[in-house]
Amino acid sequence: MEASGYTDHISRRFNKDIEELRNKVLAMGGLVEAQLSKAVSAIVSGDSELGLKVANDDYRVNNLEVSIDEECGRILATRSPAASDLRLIVAIIKTITDLERIGDEAEKIGYLAAKLAVMDRPPDSYSELKTLGNHVSHMLRDAMNAFARLDINDAYDVAAEDDRVDEEYEALTRQCITFMMEDPRSIKRVMNVTWVARSLERIGDHAKNICEYVIYMVQGKDVRHTAYSESSDLSPDAD
């Protein structure tokens, strides 16, 4: 085989490896999205069996993280990627770490759903948790869509949503404190609610992180710990 043909073969093989890697990350994201949706549903419906199933299925997310991480290590060792390809591998490694942590939070919510299912339920069936859960679920889905399309405009938009999630979490926490002060008998149940809310808030943080990795992949810019108003000039739509 001529050198140019050999080089083309290596390039095609590398591109295939990268595409398979991205598809595995998207599959992991889909699994985590499903776990989160089921966990929130278990809270709202009072389904202890569903909550425990979510918690017990976390090993599937962990297995995917290990598999993708090993594949990234193999590519780094054998392909020595540079520039944008190297940024992609680094961003994938970081993304799967955040997805695994989202899986951990969904596991916690599953266990808490099982506990809340056997306690007295409020008349609103945890509507605030449902609202917060839906918000972070949409953030996660949109973050993975931005990852799939490498769309930094969507990435900036989704990352900025984290401020609203924080506001919803803080409002819910204040409400929980009021409930506990007014009715000390509700403390155990309400504390579980606050832990669910805290897990959901953390999931929003992880979704934001994934968006920041997308921006890093595309632009090579690290926007972590930076106000997005200060980073808006990095967007291709900026004037």
Image (cartoon, helix red, strand yellow):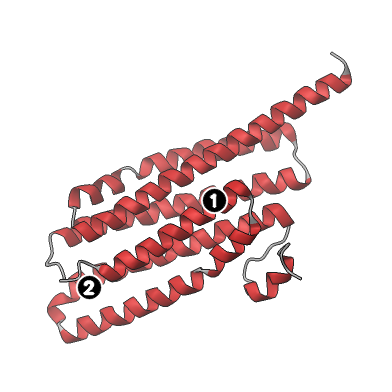
Task: Relative to 58, say whether 230 is above or below.
Answer: below
Type of amino acid at the residue the image marks with label 1: Asn
Q: Is residue 143 visible?
A: yes
x, y percent for residue 71? 59, 35
Residue at the outermost top position: 1
Q: Is residue 65 visible?
A: no
Task: Relative to 170, say whether 2 is above or below.
Answer: above
Q: Earlier in the sequence, mark 2 or mark 1?
A: 1
When asked about the image quadrant of residue 81, the answer is: top right
Query: What label does residue 145 carry, if any?
Result: 1
x, y percent for residue 111? 26, 55
Residue at label 2?
190
Q: Residues within 10 Å of mark 1 (few under 14, many from 20)?
A: some
x 53%, y 51%: residue: 144
Type of amino acid at the residue the image marks with label 2: Val
Query: What label does residue 2 carry, if any?
Result: none
Tell me the SS state at disc 1.
helix
When asked about the image quadrant of residue 156, the answer is: bottom right
x 48%, y 51%: residue: 99
